[in-house]
Image (cartoon, rainbow, N blue to C red):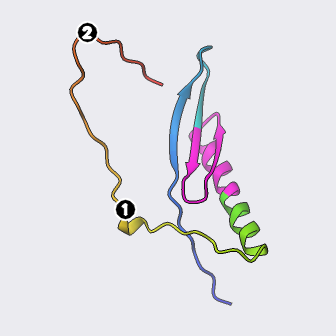
Amino acid sequence: MEKKILNYRIIIEREKYDNGEIVYVAYCPTLCISDYGDTIEEVLTSIKDGIELAVKSLAKEGKEIPIDHMEEQIITSAKVIAPTGIKLSIA
């Protein structure tokens, strides 16, 4: 049986709570799953486990497994000039 490798886009954001605690939130938009961890490594391991579980569950139920088409996506950022005198917050 031939193995297929599925590659999913994961977005990780740093969040800072009011008490100063920092966590990392990972989101896989294609499968609509997310998780969090205290470090980037921890959240990557956790979200990978979640992705594998989601794929296995969909396969077991006989449902189609959504895949990413990352070669067709453009992921970028935009730099803009902030107005003077505003208060900025880093999450």
Is residue 51 left or right of 61 when viewed as pictured?
Answer: left
Along the line of sight, the residue nearer the viewer: 5 or 61:
61
* Vertical placement of residue 47 versus 5, above or below: above
Residue 81 at x, y = what percent?
Answer: 21, 26
Magenta-highlighted residues: 25-50
- Residue denoted by label 1: 73
Q: What residue type is disc 1 on? A: Gln
Q: What's under tag 2, amino acid-wise?
A: Gly
Please identify the quadrant where the N terminus is shown: bottom right
Crowdedness near tag 1: few (<14), some (14–19) or many (≥20) residues, C-alpha within 10 Å? few
Residue at point 53%, 66% (across, down): 7
> Looking at the rendering, which quadrant does residue 29 occupy?
bottom right
Dot 1 falls on a residue whose secondary structure is: loop
Residue farthest top in this picture: 85
Cα–Cα gap, marks 2 and 1: 36 Å
Identify the residue under disc 2: 85
Vertical order, 7 against 28 (above or below): below
Mark closer to the chain start, 2 or 1: 1
Q: Which residue lies most toward the bottom here?
A: 1
The stretch drawn in magenta includes residue 63: no
Left or right: 72, with 12 as reference point: left
